[in-house]
Image (tube, rainbow, N blue to C red):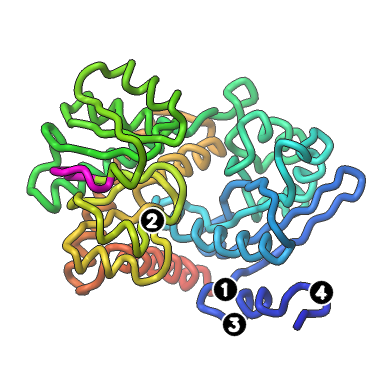
Amino acid sequence: MTDVTGAPADVLHTLFHSDQGGHEQVVLCQDRASGLKAVIAIHNTALGPALGGTRFYPYASEADAVADALNLARGMSYKNAMAGLDHGGGKAVIIGDPERDKTEELLLAYGRFVASLGGRYVTACDVGTYVADMDVVARECRWTTGRSPENGGAGDSSVLTAFGVYQGMRASAQHLWGDPSLRGRKVGVAGVGKVGRHLVEHLRSEGAEVVVTDVREEAVGRIVAAHPTGVTAVADTATLIRVEGLDIYAPCALGGALNDDTVPALTAQVVCGAANNQLAHPGVEKDLADRGILYAPDYVVNAGGVIQVADELHGFDFDRCKAKAAKIFDTTLAIFARAKEDGIPPAAAADRIAEQRMHEAAAGRGR
């Protein structure tokens, strides 16, 4: 069954009726001249204008694109709330292969659509889009972050993303072992791209032993060359999660890292990483808790990047952003305390805290 637009009816059900819905606005954008087809989803603006990245991806169908935009926008509401930002959640997806379909004309057309929302949605980079792309979008839209320093932006956000994950690890250590120090701890990092590389630097500077893996051999080679001692490499993630004596596992690559196959095999006592959407399905957080594994919610500890892009709107200041990202330590501890108090997993506790902040903000604005 389809709706009046021809889209599958289950998309509208998600939007208007399911617990995953509740979005304020969804905009379908099309520019025939450039070939642009995009979806902009605004989930919640109780805390302020929606903020979230632009994903450029070859979706199998328009319905898949809408569904992804809805899910991602909702996730950004929770991330921004827990990061202490005065922003709601939004996300945009552009349908197409970024290697083949991305053009200057298409990005400019997209920028005009974002600008037409008058600041209700602030965009940034995501999968398939980069700093150079945001520089182009910004030519048509002043509500664009993630730009290059030459164009008034902050550039690459991986430094602060890694710093926030590091703070989440320190909070996990404090909660579990009574000491935030990671010296002598064995930490497994799956994915040593931009964020993972910076995370390894933090860990080694504190004296942690690090085990790394990545699907790209050259990425692993660079890490091992940069750290001739204290860093070892293993063949793949399946091997990494089974390393004997692992204290912390940091998924820093693709989502879905915690699933029915990996959770039973984990040797680590803590999971704290930069990857988005680490829980493959609802219920995985309970599986982790049942095994006594402490999970630091991904959208809380990886918020350093969104803290950085939000700061661009006020004139970027790295020290100010780093101070905000350092608060991820306290936020993570508060989540663990709430989880213990309510008898629920940390992921559920984080959701409750975020929902409370959004609810209070909406009530204060008479909504």
For badge 2, the amino acid type reads Met
Give the CA distance from mark 2 to mark 3: 25 Å
In terms of image quadrants, where is residue 211?
top left
- Compare residues 268 and 158 and report the one nearer the observer: 268
Q: Are marks 4 and 3 in contact (CB under 8 Å)?
A: no
* Labels 1 and 2: the sequence-earlier one: 1
Q: Quarter of the image containing the C terminus?
A: bottom right
Neighbor class of circle 4 (other Cα within 10 Å; few <14, some 14-19, many 20+) is: few
Q: Which residue is identified by label 4?
A: 6
Looking at the rendered structure, the secondary structure element under dot 4 is: loop
Looking at the rendered structure, the secondary structure element under dot 1 is: loop
Give the CA distance from mark 1 to mark 2: 19 Å
Give the CA distance from mark 1 to mark 4: 20 Å
Residue pictured at 63% horizontal, 69% vertical: 24
Q: Position of residue 320 (x, y in %)?
A: 39, 33
For badge 1, the amino acid type reads Gly
Q: Is residue 246 magenta?
A: yes
Q: Are marks 3 and 1 in contact (CB under 8 Å)?
A: yes
Report if residue 321 is visible in the image.
no
Q: Which residue is identified by label 2?
A: 82
Q: Main secondary structure of the magenta part?
A: loop
Q: Which residue is identified by label 3?
A: 17
Q: Are marks 1 and 4 in contact (CB under 8 Å)?
A: no
